[in-house]
Image: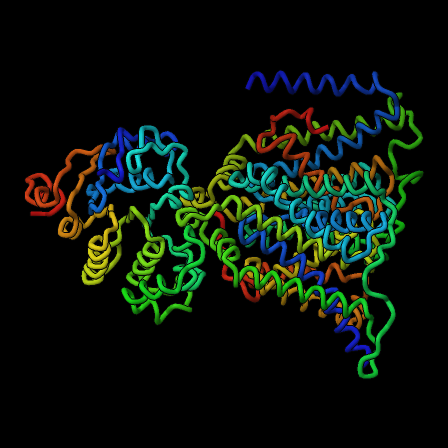
Amino acid sequence: MRVKLIAFVIGVLVLIVLPFVLTDFRTVQLATVGAYFIAILGLDVLTGHSGQISLGHGAFMAVGAYTTAILMANHGVRDLWTIPIAAVVAGVIGLLAGVPALRLSGLYLALATFGIAVVLPTILKKFDHFTGGSTGITLFGKPTQTGHGAGIWGMTNNQWLYALTWTIGTVVFLIAWWLLDSRFGRSLRAIRDSELAATASGVNRAKYKVLAFGVSAAFAGVGGALFAINVAYVAPDTFPIQLSLYLLVGAVVGFFGSIWEPCSVRC
Amino acid sequence: MTNFIQQIVSGLASGGIYALLALAIVLIHRSTGVINFAQGEMATLSAFVCWTLMDHGWAFWPAFGATLLLSFFGGVTLQAVVIRPIQNGPLIGIVILTIGLLIAINGLDTWIWGGAAKQFHGPFSTAPIRVGGVAFSKQDLGVIAVALVAVVLIGALFTRTRLGLGLRAAAVNPVEARLVGIRVAAMLALGWGLAATLGAVAGVMAAPSLFLEPNMMQTVLLYSFAAAVLGGMDSPIGAVVGGLLLGVLLNLVGTYVHWIGGELRLATALAVILGVLLVRPSGLFGRTALRRA
Amino acid sequence: MSLLELRDVEARYGEIRALHGVSLTVDDGDFVALLGANGAGKTTTLRAISGTVKTSGDVLLEGSKVSHRTPEGMARSGVAHVPEGRGTFMTLSVLDNLRLGAWVHGNASPRDLAHVFEFFPRLYDRRAQQAGLLSGGEQQMLAIGRAMMAKPRLLLLDEPSLGLAPLVAREIFGVLGQMHESGTTIVVVEQNAMLALSYAKHAYVLETGRVVLGGEAADLRQNESVRRSYLGY
């Protein structure tokens, strides 16, 4: 435990120092990486800890991103406030998705989520009055952006994005750490390792599996919201199947069921 | 009425391609329990190989034959080298592996042949042919014929030959199959080889109309998954019937339900997948699948 | 002349050692019963012979050591192993199941099939049916029929009477007796010690992975401890 704490502190220190060492462009690149990091944390909860394989987590990112974009562009909501809203919206959809997912085991869940991820861009394009269709929604230059115009505490726009993303990333990481160390996490892992044994031990399989979906979707929603804020543009083709596949690869390579597997590998 | 029949025939043609790829998917799932997410990309690679041969002056049918052979050995090698080591490991490992293959093969295609779409000159002309006063595409009829021949040949292999018996036995009960002397490991590799060959037929038949590019089979893959699920993931007959049914269904729904049109064709396939998995997971012909506890 | 010899064979499942050094001999043309309680290592011994489980120690077939044994290889060497639960190919037809029995000989000859059907007419009636639909007794007959198609030198059977009505079990053993008379060497693992000892010529008793008793079946039938522990009188 002590080792993990020390590693964590070092990690945070590195994060703080980086933007001062790197160029402005690299900084915003890293900021976007942070958005993916949060989504991958969510996927780790779902696939790594509760054992539900999702090949469609990009869809939850898209939900968060579009929530942010629509709120910022059409409803004048400040970008910061869209983040918790995106988390809730994505989380609720995650909970709803988790219920039918209970009936699908292993490979079939992977197949179903794969299908959802493949179809997502077409659906986003179809409901164009809502989503802006193929052209997407541009956030660049909108007054609802906080970082625009710079000058917040002397940071450039990109440094602000970096700080925002990674601060939230750190907070989410701590939340995930706490969750996964608690009874919630233990129940998830028990279910992952043997549903039969877990149920026999009194773990409410359905409740925890659905919750896992909800939590992981909420994380991905936050990631998506930050992604939209960073890139300042969302479009259906920003969320192809490859995104979901890369997220899964990232989760497996970076975490594989333990939040403490080398975070560095994810990048 | 004319349009209706035309839609059915062209639906059977695309359905034939779905059936072939679905059959490949079912073959692998039946024998190894793996869902090969890279099946579509493997088919694309085969189509590229065929194109390259023709680009070097080969006529279509010899190029096609060589492609089938190469695809077969490719599939066998893939199973023996890449899949076999992790086959009995955790599910997530196998999924990641086939996903990784998907990404890798897609990247390989782009690297070698570039991302731009290429013209693929198939064996059948696109000229229409009139049968009973209704115009059909020669290409559609040709694809249906090729798909039928492929399915019949594979069916005969499985049901009438000793090798087919061994393949079936290895899929049904690998432990006992070894006890009667069957080299199960070799059978599994053969299964992948046959699946790759079926995929190659699908890819080459699809290339003329879909245009050859690295992402060509991405949507076909989803349609084929829908067909396999609809037919029952462990039923070869289901895969073929499912494919043909789905091809016709998608055409008819796309033509006559205007809200869906051409844009939501993929979504319809997804609806089939989700619908079947949630309501009747064994599909039309499958047995009820056992859950991995 | 010994057909099969096990010398100090050990076998483990992961961390658990199931056989602690089993030594036994099976002569050509013999009928041997392996007796013992649940978990004594009887099934594992058969698995050790057919190569289904990894072993240390020596397994000799006709006097020569067979190392790197695989189930397929042992099948080719003439060892037919009918596992616990019969190993039926459930979704294949009865006929296909029998054909598979002849795998090591290439295609199944119609004459061999006819021979099996003579022994088991019920199988002929159901030859096109899915094997999984057969009753327990019929599946056992199918398993033995499959073994007959293999024309093995050594036939290993694991609990052939399991789950069968006493009459059917007798029928099965009757067939085994006939096979033995035709020259097949048989090793049978049985919980039903009474039944096994009435057909076998020799027997071994296993306890916690070791052979504790061995000898002629007739002698074991009279043996005090065997009678008390396994024959119930």
Residue depicted at x 29% and y 46%: C154
Residue depicted at x 58% and y 38%: B93
Residue placed most toward the observer, B38 or A53: B38
Question: Can you give x and y, in whole percent of width and height, for residue C122 in the image?
Answer: 31, 69
Q: Is residue C228 left or right of residue B62?
A: left
Seen in the picture, residue B129 relative to A5 is either above or below; the reply is below
Seen in the picture, residue A80 relative to C90 is either above or below; the reply is above
**Quadrant housing residue A167:** top right
Q: How many marks?
A: 0
Seen in the picture, residue A256 relative to C194 is either above or below; the reply is above
Q: Is residue A156 left or right of residue B10?
A: right
Question: Can you give x and y, in whole percent of width and height, for residue B139 in the image?
Answer: 81, 67
Q: Is residue C206 visible?
A: yes
Question: Can you give x and y, in whole percent of width and height, for residue C85 in the image?
Answer: 33, 52
Residue placed most toward the observer, A262 or B111: B111
**Quadrant housing residue B285:** bottom right
Residue reaching furthest bottom?
A: B132
Residue depicted at x 82% and y 71%: B137
Seen in the picture, residue C45 relative to B2 is either above or below; the reply is above
Q: Is residue A87 visible?
A: no
Residue placed most toward the observer, A263 or B144: B144
Quarter of the N terminus of chain C within the rendering:
top left
Question: Can you give x and y, in whole percent of width and height, for residue B175 in the image?
Answer: 42, 47
Q: How is the image coloured?
A: rainbow
